[in-house]
Image (spheres, grey):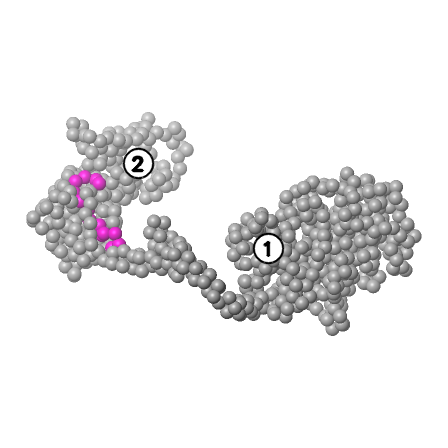
């Protein structure tokens, strides 16, 4: 097998002649500063009169293609220089040791004695690469084995040459490997040169201390704001600008003050930065004090104590004046902030009708409760706002609803919801805990409902609970009780306006809680107040409401009828796929009822396990709720009563319904009750009526 050998010596890197010691001659202002695209920084210079010493001299040559390139010595192309790291990059010839056409090994080595020059091979910034099959390459500090103190290398082998591929060498982006190198590696096809990093230093003296004591005036750190450091690679020293200064330390006045205030990290957030000569100073705004130890703006405890004492004294001797001042401040807050929640008229109306029977939270309390509204606290998102879970004092969980967009319509909706919920206290309606008036964006605070929504229980992420039909019936009954309270017992009556399974929340005991009153209205007192913009959710909208733009209690009844269909069939109200005629659940259901083919829309577990009389009774109730004429639909009270009786039939199958009275009421010929006592939302449940606890977050927003 063909064997190749490559050798690269740390002491055989650059062929440079020994040069005399540097002098302190300064470059002329007319010296050329660039060669091609390379900036030439003193102590390097183009021409002997422009460099610190001959071995820092750079030759700028025009190539055949017309481009100028800089060279150190006679044949090493200079790629760039660095004063801060005291390094240069040059193009390095690739050493080879290969068989020629005659089968003889030919070596291509080059080197120089580095000791009298300022350059040393950088042992940190270079990569040593060996190419070949069964090849050993080594790097040493001397050709002579007797004088050698350092030797290192690596081995390259090829298990299967055909598996090699062209591409960059791992860890060395400047060298592109070619498979042809294995068979014909020489100066021509190898590309000839690759970059190499050299450390440089002022090496006419062994250290900074010796250079400072030298009386010949050759000390190179000429800037008054510079520092000297011994070279980390060989004898000599290097210069750098002092902390707080930047520039060229090898020139008089070369290190100028650096403006640290340009760096955003100089002072803490909220701090004030002031640049000084060679440094900077940080200060903090009123009420805070800069800590040198922690580099932070901490509260000024002395100022806080003084203000507190002064405030207490002022409270003692000026109580009456403070009361007037507080009233003025409160009035200003109401005018500037609460105006966005519906204005002063809404605030006065709440006080006169119901009083502030809830907590007025501060902005700081809500920020702390939600960890500054962290994304992990989001439990609901919809068209009316974003809902976060929060923890307030006494470890009480709450749900905090913020408006998603700031426009006049949504401000009005939040104000409407605030007014409506502040008047309601019912176990099947989500409770308004309080609000925040200090912010531009409206914020409402609810009780936290942990177990998701009825929609999720039937269709979504909680579907795996496999809840019993009797439990679904109980939840529907409880939701009907809540809506009945809005229609019949609130003063004035309240129309929800967006009844759907996603707005029926489930508490820790899986009790129904009607939520989201952003689209709700108070029952109008005259005809003109009926005119409104149609809003709601597709699949639940009352067709009569869509035609007349008149939102009534019977609009809620229609929407609740769709909810009953979800309970009965387990299907979603609207399907976006499939034939257009089958996308609406209510249309499919009414068609099946008209054809006396209810089984076509019922799931198998309902057909096989539930009482036919129960299923038929619930279907008839849903059918009447979905009547196209609102006046023919039952009231929410009648619906709640009927669901109560159906629940009794579900829990006690031996109890029979009074079918004649049922048919009479649903057909609209009677407004009396269905003939049995109304089952309350708290009706005792049987064993199959229980639902396992599931600590999931609920969705309060549409």
Residue lying furthest front in this view? 317
Label 1 to label 2: alpha-carbon separation: 63 Å
Location of residue 99 in the rendering, given as x and y in whole percent from the top left corner: 26, 31
Q: Is residue 403 above or below residue 178?
A: below
Q: What stretch is highlighted in magenta?
A: 232-245
Q: How crowded is mark 1: few (under 14 residues within 10 Å), some or many (20 or more)?
A: many
- SS at mark 2 in the image: loop
Residue at left offset 28%, top offset 41%: 125
Q: Is residue 430 visible?
A: yes
Would residue 545 be found to the left or right of residue 302 on screen?
right
> Residue 224 falls in which quadrant of the image?
bottom left
619 and 352: which is toward the camera: 352
- SS at mark 1 in the image: strand
Locate the C terminus and report the quarter of the image it occupies.
bottom right
Residue at left offset 61%, top offset 53%: 399
Location of residue 205 in the rendering, given as x and y in whole percent from the top left corner: 12, 43
Would residue 376 be found to the left or right of residue 424 on screen?
left
Q: How crowded is mark 2: few (under 14 residues within 10 Å), some or many (20 or more)?
A: some
> Which residue was labeled with disc 2?
129
353 and 640: which is toward the camera: 353
């Amino acid at each position: 097998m063909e064997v190749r050998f490559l050798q690269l010596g740390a002491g055989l890197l650059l062929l440079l002649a020994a040069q005399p010691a540097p002098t302190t001659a300064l470059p002329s202002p007319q010296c050329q500063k660039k060669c091609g695209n390379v900036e030439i920084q003193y102590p390097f210079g183009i021409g002997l009169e422009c460099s610190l010493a001959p071995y820092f001299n750079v030759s700028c040559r025009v190539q055949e293609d017309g481009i100028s390139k800089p060279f150190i010595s006679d044949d090493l192309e200079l790629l760039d220089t660095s004063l801060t790291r005291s390094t240069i990059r040059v193009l390095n010839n690739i050493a080879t040791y290969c068989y020629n056409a005659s089968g003889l090994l030919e070596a291509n080595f080059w080197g120089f004695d580095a000791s009298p020059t300022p350059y040393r091979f950088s042992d940190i910034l270079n990569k040593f690469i060996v190419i070949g099959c069964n090849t050993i390459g080594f790097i040493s500090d001397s050709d002579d084995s007797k004088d050698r103190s350092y030797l290192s290398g690596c081995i390259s082998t090829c298990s299967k040459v055909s598996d090699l591929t062209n591409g960059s060498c791992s860890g060395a982006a400047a060298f592109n490997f070619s498979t042809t190198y294995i068979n014909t590696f020489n100066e021509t096809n190898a590309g000839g040169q690759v970059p190499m990093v050299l450390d440089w230093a002022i090496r006419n003296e062994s250290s900074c201390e010796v250079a400072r004591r030298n009386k010949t005036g050759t000390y190179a750190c000429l800037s008054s704001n510079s520092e000297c450091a011994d070279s980390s690679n060989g004898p000599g020293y290097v210069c750098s600008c002092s902390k707080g200064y930047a520039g060229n330390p090898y020139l008089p006045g070369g290190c100028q003050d650096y403006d640290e205030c340009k760096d955003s990290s100089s002072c803490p957030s909220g701090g004030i930065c002031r640049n000084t000569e060679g440094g900077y100073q940080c200060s903090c705004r009123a009420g805070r004090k800069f800590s040198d130890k922690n580099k932070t703006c901490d509260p000024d405890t002395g100022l806080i104590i003084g203000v507190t004492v002064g405030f207490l004294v002022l409270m003692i001797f000026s109580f009456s004046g403070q009361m007037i001042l507080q009233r003025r401040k409160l009035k200003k807050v109401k005018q500037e902030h609460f105006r966005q929640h519906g204005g002063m008229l809404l605030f006065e109306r709440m006080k006169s009708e119901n009083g502030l029977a809830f907590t007025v939270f501060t902005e700081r309390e809500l920020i702390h409760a939600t960890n500054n509204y962290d994304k992990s606290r989001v439990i609901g998102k919809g068209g009316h706002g974003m809902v976060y879970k929060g923890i307030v004092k006494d470890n009480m969980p709450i749900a905090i609803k913020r408006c998603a967009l700031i426009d006049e319509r949504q401000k009005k909706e939040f104000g409407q919801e605030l007014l409506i919920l502040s008047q309601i206290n019912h176990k099947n309606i989500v409770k308004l805990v309080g609000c925040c008036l200090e912010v531009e964006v409206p914020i409402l605070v609810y009780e936290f409902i942990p177990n998701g929504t009825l929609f999720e229980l039937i269709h979504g992420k909680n579907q795996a609970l496999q809840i019993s039909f009797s439990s679904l019936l109980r939840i529907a009954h409880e939701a009907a009780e809540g809506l009945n309270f809005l229609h019949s017992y609130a003063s004035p009556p309240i129309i929800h306006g967006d009844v759907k399974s996603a707005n029926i929340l489930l508490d820790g005991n899986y009790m129904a809680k009607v939520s989201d009153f952003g689209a709700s209205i108070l029952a109008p007192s005259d005809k003109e107040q009926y005119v409104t913009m149609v809003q709601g959710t597709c699949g639940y909208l009352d067709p009569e409401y869509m035609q007349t733009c008149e939102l009534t209690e019977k609009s809620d009844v229609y929407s609740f009828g769709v909810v009953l269909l979800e309970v009965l069939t387990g299907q979603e109200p609207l399907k976006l796929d499939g034939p257009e005629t089958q996308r609406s659940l209510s249309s499919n259901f009414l068609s099946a009822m008209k054809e006396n083919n209810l089984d076509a829309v019922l799931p198998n577990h309902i057909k096989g396990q539930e009482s036919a009389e129960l299923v038929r009774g619930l279907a008839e109730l849903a059918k009447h709720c979905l009547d196209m004429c609102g006046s023919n639909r039952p009231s929410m009270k009648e619906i709640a009563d009927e669901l109560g009786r159906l629940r009794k039939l579900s829990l006690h199958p031996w109890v029979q319904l009074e079918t004649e009275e049922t048919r009479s009421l649903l057909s609209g010929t009677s407004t009396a009750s269905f003939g049995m006592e109304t089952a309350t939302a708290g009706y005792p449940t049987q064993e199959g009526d229980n639902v396992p606890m599931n600590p999931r977050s609920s969705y309060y927003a549409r």
